[in-house]
Amino acid sequence: MIKMLHLLFVLLTFGAFVGKMWVSVSRPELLTQKAFKIAPHVISSLLLLTGIILVFQGQWLSGDYGWLVAKLIALVGFIGLGVLSMHTEGTNRWLAFAGTIVCFIYISIVAVSKNPWFFL
């Protein structure tokens, strides 16, 4: 059950990020509404909470947990690049957006494979 909730929040987080990016380009005046400011933080917090529950439920800290550290580092990159993509303009915005998508894909692949070096 927790895993399904976590996967739901993964999809909602990604959708909220892409949607907020689309709104920031097409109708930036909507970003001043309270829902656009609060909802992504609520979704991301629930994603993080379900992830923490899964770590302890799956006893993943008792074995090789390098993949969890890699996911956390990539999560920091995801957040940083996401913030950068929302607060910059022009080419830098789209480079940060692309970097955010790459971080999301990396986190997803590591979550499934449990291998932070899957590309080697």
Image (cartoon, rainbow, N blue to C red):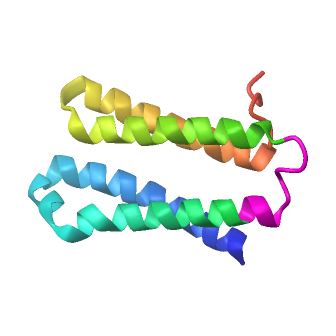
In this rendering, the count of numbered labels is: 0
63 falls in the magenta region: yes
Image coordinates of residue 74 in percent, x first then y, are 57, 36
Is 59 situated left or right of 106 in this image?
Answer: right
Q: Is residue 12 visible?
A: no
Q: Position of residue 31 (x, y in %)?
A: 17, 58
* Residue occupying image coordinates x 45% and y 66%: 43
Please, is residue 31 above or below residue 67 in the view?
below
Tell which of 5 and 57 is nearer to you.
Answer: 57
In the figure, 87 relative to 108: above or below?
Answer: above
Q: Which residue sits furthest right? A: 63
Q: Position of residue 11 (x, y in %)?
A: 52, 61
| Left or right of 116, for residue 17 | left
When the figure is inspected, residue 57 is found, relative to residue 69, above or below; the finding is below
Q: Quadrant of the C terminus?
A: top right
The residue sitting at the left extreme is: 29
Q: Quadrant of residue 83?
A: top left
Going 48% across and 63% down the picture, which residue do you hit? 45
Residue 115 makes an appearance in the image: yes
Position of residue 97 measured from the top left corner of the image (x, y, whole percent): 37, 36
Is residue 42 highlighted in magenta? Answer: no
Eyeballing the image, is 114 above or below 38? above
Q: Quadrant of residue 91?
A: top left
Quadrant of res 68: top right
Q: Provide the residue span drawn in magenta.
A: 54-64
49 lies left or right of 62: left
Q: Residue furthest top?
A: 120
Residue located 20% across and 49% down the image: 24
Main SS, magenta region, reads: loop
